[in-house]
Image (tube, grey):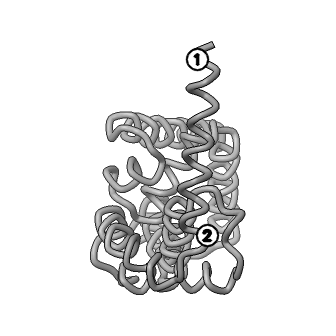
Amino acid sequence: MATETQHQSKPKEADRENRKWADAPFKTLYRQFAARLTLNLRRAFGDGPPDPEDMTQLAFQKLMERGDHEEICDLESFLWRTARNSTLNELRAAGTRTKYDFELEQLFFGPGRDETTPERVYSMRQQLAQVDAVLRGMPTRTRRCFLLHKVDGLSITKVAEVMGLSKTSVHRHVVKAGIEIDQQLQRHTKDGA
């Protein structure tokens, strides 16, 4: 019986907390959450670009555009997810993809190997298809850790924060993914030779 009462009181407390923020003007919400949100963005993604303050502003802007925020269960979590996702989108748009493409080219095809023949193009496409197939076959968490670290350029520490995992766990996932890709490419090379 005591357990039922405890479980019932927690949602009521959360409802009271959410009702308090539902009626609060945006200025009050901003004062309450902005500094902590900016600090967390800075810890997760560094000083920018994009600027953590800009991403905080964008999160609040999206909350304002949404209008009625009474149905949001946890405003702080909503703001964090909005700011984090916006930051990740900005990082992607800023050219991390280009960096990854260059790294892939250097990794697979190396410097000084710029002779482009039909056979070489075909071989490169096969290798990239193999990498894609390996990535698609990985467990979601392993693939996401690998892509956040290698494609999006986040540090192991930042990936751990974003994913809610320990740094050791993220490192294991990234290494596991790298080994799987390397093994597949070696099998492809042996089969093609």
Q: Is residue 152 above or below residue 169?
A: below
Q: Measuring 48% from the left and 81% from the top, which residue is drawn there?
A: 95
Of residue 30 and residue 173, the one placed in the foreground of this image is 30
Q: Relative to residue 23, is residue 170 drawn left or right?
A: left
Within 10 Å of the Cα at label 2, are there few (<14), some (14-19), or many (20+) other Cα atoms? some
Quarter assignment of residue 158: bottom left
Mark positioned earlier in the residue sequence (2 or 1) = 1
Please tell me the numbered disc located at residue 177.
none
Of residue 87 and residue 177, the one placed in the foreground of this image is 87
In the picture as drawn, the residue positioned furthest to the top comes out as 1
Q: Measuring 67% from the left and 52% from the top, which residue is drawn there?
A: 132
Q: Measuring 51% from the left and 80% from the top, which residue is drawn there?
A: 90
Q: Return the x and y of residue 54 as percentages of the image width and height.
A: 42, 86
Please tell me the numbered disc located at residue 22.
2
Q: Return the x and y of residue 89 as percentages of the image width and height.
A: 56, 75
Q: Relative to residue 74, is residue 38 drawn left or right?
A: left
Residue 57 visible (yes or no): yes
Spatial CA distance of label 2 from label 1 is 29 Å
Kindly state the secondary structure of the residue where label 1 is placed: helix
Q: Return the x and y of residue 153 as percentages of the image width and height.
A: 40, 64
Looking at the rendered image, the quarter that the N terminus falls into is: top right
Kindly state the secondary structure of the residue where label 2 is placed: helix
Q: Is residue 126 above or below residue 80?
A: above
- The residue pinned by badge 1 equals 3
Residue 101 visible (yes or no): no
Q: Relative to residue 90, is residue 19 drawn left or right?
A: right
The amino acid pointed to by label 2 is Ala
Q: Return the x and y of residue 104 as percentages of the image width and height.
A: 49, 63
